[in-house]
Image: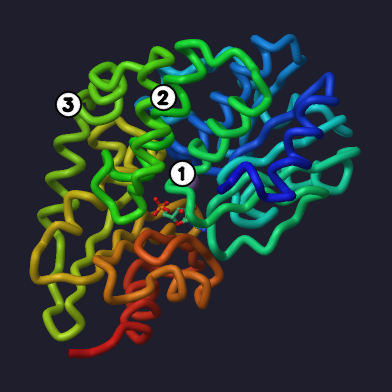
Amino acid sequence: MIRDLPAFRQAVELLTSATSLTLACHVGPDGDALGSMLGLGAAARAAGKKVEASFGEPFDLPRTYRFLPLDLLVPPGEVTEAPELFVTFDAGSADRLGVLASRVATAETVLVIDHHVSNTGFGTVDLIVPDAAATAEIVYHLVSALGWPLDEEAATALYTGIVTDTGRFQYSNTKPETLRVAAALVEAGARPEVVGRHVYEEVPFGYLRVAGAVLGRAVLEPEYRLVWSVLTGDDLAAGGIGLEDTDDLIDLIRIAEESDVAVLVKELDRGRVKVSLRSRGRVDVGAVAVALGGGGHHNAAGFTWEGTARDAIAEVRVRLPRD
Ligand code: AMP
Ligand code: MN
Ligand code: MN
């Protein structure tokens, strides 16, 4: 039981005694990073704490998450230099905080809340629960043990984290406990149809063009049971969307039934690429990502690479089993 963990009790003590909280989630934040951070932030604010929340550059918020309590957010340049309590969310290592990693050294106390199995801890207290489907699931237990108000705003943010990290309750990380937490969040005011619409049913028209381009150049390599594609800067410009709005693109290519592993390479600036990896379970893409300087989970992982998309694909390919 998560609430019996010594780190859980220590986390509750830290959060109870702090008057001011500085929150940070991983760079390029997803629904769990933002949802867990803003969910805890909203509940802490309702409990009378002073709260600021941020994430490292680029400080671009995915359009999808504009319905979350964003008034808690400040740009990373405005984050307190020496926080009283610095709390990190969904970041498997300090470098995943980007420019805000510096606060790990300057804060009085650091609390790490995460569910990445690769996280070896970098805080004063490390609440790392790999069994949790989402960091937001851990945060729910904290808020409830703290007795902080869980209003509709906080419940919606936490529910968003769970929905996105479980792929709408369809991945193997969806445990009975995950569904119990989700049920409690719906009871507290989260509305599945509202979260579902914002996250999965609303994209700008330009996204269709971008998806078309990425799907159109997808490659299947049957000998590796690999499907891969590339997203270019030109695609984004033509579609009028940002890199931060492309998190779900990989979900369109990974469904090819001939594949066990899907890879989407996204061109960044200056000859760098960001690589997203997905597995159906046979291959541990987390290990592949770690070997290439990144991280993640068994079935979903990523890394950034200096070089071309083809270089990055080649690096992944040599680490895959061949049929
Ligand atoms: P993504 O493909 O960006 O959706 O990321 C999938 C998973 O891999 C998430 O759990 C991320 O936290 C993790 N991940 C992605 N990129 C990196 C990276 N550069 N370093 C460490 N972990 C990463
Ligand atoms: Mn994440
Ligand atoms: Mn997560």
Q: Residues within 10 Å of mark 2 (few under 14, many from 20)?
A: some
- Tell me the CA gap for discs 1 and 2: 15 Å
Residue 134's label in the rendered image is: 1
Query: Is the residue marked 1 within 8 Å of ligand 3, measured from its CB?
Result: yes
Give the residue drawn at x 21%, y 34%: 207
Q: Are marks 1 and 3 in contact (CB under 8 Å)?
A: no
Callout 2 amino acid = Ala
Give the residue drawn at x 77%, y 36%: 86
Query: Mark 3 — residue?
Result: 205
In the image, residue 5 lies at what x, y percent? Answer: 67, 50
Q: Residues within 10 Å of mark 1 (few under 14, many from 20)?
A: many
- Tell me the CA gap for discs 1 and 3: 30 Å
Residue 184's label in the rendered image is: 2
Towards the viewer: 148 or 117: 148
Counting residues from the N terminus, which is met first, the one under dot 3 or under dot 2? 2
User: Horizontally, is 127 left or right of 178 in the view?
Assistant: right
Secondary structure beneath label 3: helix
Q: Are marks 3 and 2 in contact (CB under 8 Å)?
A: no
